[in-house]
Each structure stands twice: as C-alpha cells, then as structure tokens.
Image: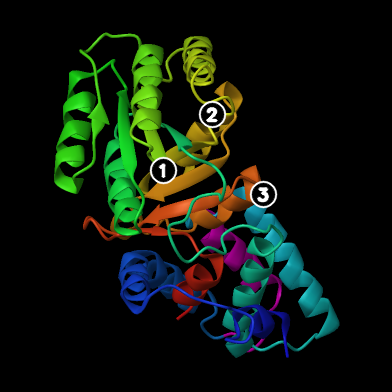
C-alpha cells in the first residue's frame, strides 16, 4: 500500500469530517480545483511522460496557484526524485504523484488532523486571542467559531478588544446576539487590555469554557502593534495565569501572496500559534493553505469555505487534499 493510500485509508482515519462538512469543502474548493486542473491539462497536452517541460509547467502552475515558491520547489524536487527512479512515468500518473507528494508534505507535521471543534482538556477557561488585519474576515470568523463551540456544548464569552473601530465592536455585538453568547465591550477608543481584563474576569465568574478576544488589525506600525498585543497578554495573565492559550491569525485566502506577507508581519509582531484561512470559496488561490502551512510551520486550524454560519470548519489535511484531487 502506498504512503498516500495509508494516510487516506479508512483504517488509518479514526474519524472524518461530517458529510455536510465534506460537501461544503468540495464546493468551497471548486474554483481552485477547476483553475488548477484546467491549467494542468493544458500543460500536459500532447505529452506521454513526465519530462522537464512538464515539470517546468507544473512549477509555474503551482506558483500561480499561490502555493508559494519555496513550497512549490519542495514539491517539484519530490516529483523529480520519483521521475529519476521511474524514467517512464506517464502523464496519467502525474495527478496521483502530485496528490501523494502534497499529502506527504502536509503530513510532516502532526497538525491538521482534527475533525471536530474541540479545546485542550483541563484548560478552563480556554483563552483564544485573535489577530489579523481589517477586512480578512476576523470578526466573522470569531462569530462563526463561537457558534460552532456553542453547538458543541461549550459556554463561550466574547471580548471586543478591537476598540480602534466602532464598527468592529458593533459587528461583534451582532454576532454575539445572533449566536446567543455574552460579550464584554467598552466604548470605541477604550484601552484594549482593559476590555480583555474585564472579559476574563466575567468569563471566570460565569464558569465559561472558552473566551475569544478580538484585537485591532493595524499593521502600519509593527512596534505599536507588538506593544499593544504584549500588553493585552500581560493584563489577561493577571486573571488567567497562562492566557492566552492560543493566538490565532486570520488570513484572507483570496489575497494569495498578500496573505504570506501578513503572516510574516504578524509572526514577527507576536507569537502566533495557529491560523484560520478564510474566503477560500471565492478564489482560485486555495493553494495558499498548502504553502502557508508548510512555510510557517504554524498549524492551520480552521478554514472558511463559504458565507454560511456552518461554513467555517476545522482544517483536516487529509480531507483537504482528498477534496482538492477529487
């Protein structure tokens, strides 16, 4: 049994995404898949075996699909090694090889294996601080995450610590009302650390399971951002000693290489521990998930594959690659 078959076989996967989630994922990746495979079909037209021209074209396709240059080179190198072993690899086998090597790349980290919305055991409240520039879907992601966690039976409290924009506070309030979870907020211009402190105090008093803190998305001055996020962390730790348990960076998948740049900026400004990649349904740049996961070695925890409240799902690398090549 090949490596790919091993990691994708039903014997190896104890559980998988629900059928609804799989259908949502398939639909969300449609644009990426159709663009990628139409380019691949043109690249191999008239070819009978995988040669240098095919590999050059494949490299160009992967880069243009926003997989990223470094990750693309890794994938091409892996395929070249396969070609060296078998000089007569046919074009009809290229899809399978590509599938196996991308799966292998993603499987080098022990992440992306979740199938449900869960939190670490013996951590209460679990504190998640969310960062990201304005417009990437940060507040929407928080709202959908709150919905999923509540549906899973957790008590959730939201903190509106993006006090730089009144719209951010109001938008989070709308999501709190829609999902039916409490929110702690202050006026625009308030100290974000003060909001975070009040949120954690309220969460502890309510015996909450999960606290999600929204933060400002400004990147024009990295030093100010770094100082602000550090202060928010320090103040939270006065209430919950090891908070935050995760710092999640939200990236807009449709921006492609710009998402890589934002990841660089935020990982330099604060210790990002996980990622959420949004808006994959509206773009042909879904390959960015593969590249970001590989390049930053920060786990992609959630992906947004549609506008519906159910369309934020846990990132499962097996299901993702399976859907991509389906």
- Looking at the rendered image, the disc whose residue lies closer to the viewer, 3 or 2, is 2
User: Residue 194 falls in which quadrant of the image?
Assistant: top left
Indicate yes or no whether the magenta region holds residue 50: yes
Q: Earlier in the sequence, mark 3 or mark 2?
A: 3
Element on which disc 3 rests: helix
Task: Indicate whether 180 appears above or below 241.
Answer: below
Main SS of residues in magenta? helix
Which residues make up the magenta segment? 47-63
Residue 257, percent from left and from top: 48, 42
Residue 22, percent from left and from top: 37, 74
Please give the name of the residue rendered at 48% of the width and 68% of the height, measured from the top-left corner. Answer: 320
Which residue appears farthest toward the right when viewing the image?
A: 85
Residue 193, percent from left and from top: 41, 14
- Looking at the rendered image, the disc whose residue lies closer to the viewer, 3 or 1, is 1
Left or right: residue 317 compared with residue 70: left
| Residue of label 2 | 243
Indicate yes or no whether the magenta region holds residue 112: no
User: Residue 89 falls in which quadrant of the image?
Assistant: bottom right
| Residue of label 1 | 209
Q: Which mark is residue 70?
A: 3
Task: Indicate whether 196 appears above or below 37.
Answer: above
């Amino acid at each position: 049994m090949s490596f790919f078959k091993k990691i994708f076989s039903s014997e190896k996967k104890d559980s998988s995404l629900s059928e609804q989630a799989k259908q949502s994922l398939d639909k969300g990746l449609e644009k990426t898949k159709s663009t990628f495979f139409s380019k691949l079909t043109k690249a191999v037209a008239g070819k009978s075996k995988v040669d240098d021209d095919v590999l050059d074209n494949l490299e160009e396709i992967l880069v243009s699909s926003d997989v990223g240059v470094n990750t693309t080179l890794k994938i091409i190198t892996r395929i070249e090694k396969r070609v060296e072993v078998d000089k007569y690899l046919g074009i009809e086998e290229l899809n399978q090889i590509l599938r196996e090597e991308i799966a292998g790349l993603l499987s080098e980290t022990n992440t992306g294996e979740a199938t449900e919305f869960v939190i670490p055991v013996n951590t209460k409240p679990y504190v998640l601080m969310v960062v990201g520039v304005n417009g990437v879907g940060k507040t929407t992601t928080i709202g959908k995450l709150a919905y999923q966690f509540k549906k899973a039976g957790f008590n959730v409290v939201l903190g509106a610590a993006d006090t730089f924009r009144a719209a951010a506070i109001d938008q989070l309030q709308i999501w709190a009302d829609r999902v039916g979870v409490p929110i702690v907020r202050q006026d625009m211009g308030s100290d974000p650390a003060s909001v975070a402190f009040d949120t954690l105090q309220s969460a502890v008093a309510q015996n909450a399971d999960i606290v999600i803190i929204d933060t400002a998305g400004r990147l024009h001055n990295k030093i100010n951002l770094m100082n602000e996020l550090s202060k928010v962390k320090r103040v939270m730790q006065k209430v919950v000693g090891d908070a935050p348990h995760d710092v999640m960076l939200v990236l807009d998948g449709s921006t492609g290489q710009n998402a890589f740049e934002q990841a660089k900026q935020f990982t330099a400004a604060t210790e990002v521990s996980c990622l959420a990649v949004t808006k994959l349904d509206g773009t042909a740049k879904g390959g960015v998930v593969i590249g970001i996961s590989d390049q930053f070695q920060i786990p992609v925890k959630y992906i947004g594959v549609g506008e519906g409240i159910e369309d934020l799902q846990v990132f499962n690398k097996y299901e993702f690659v399976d859907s991509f090549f389906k």
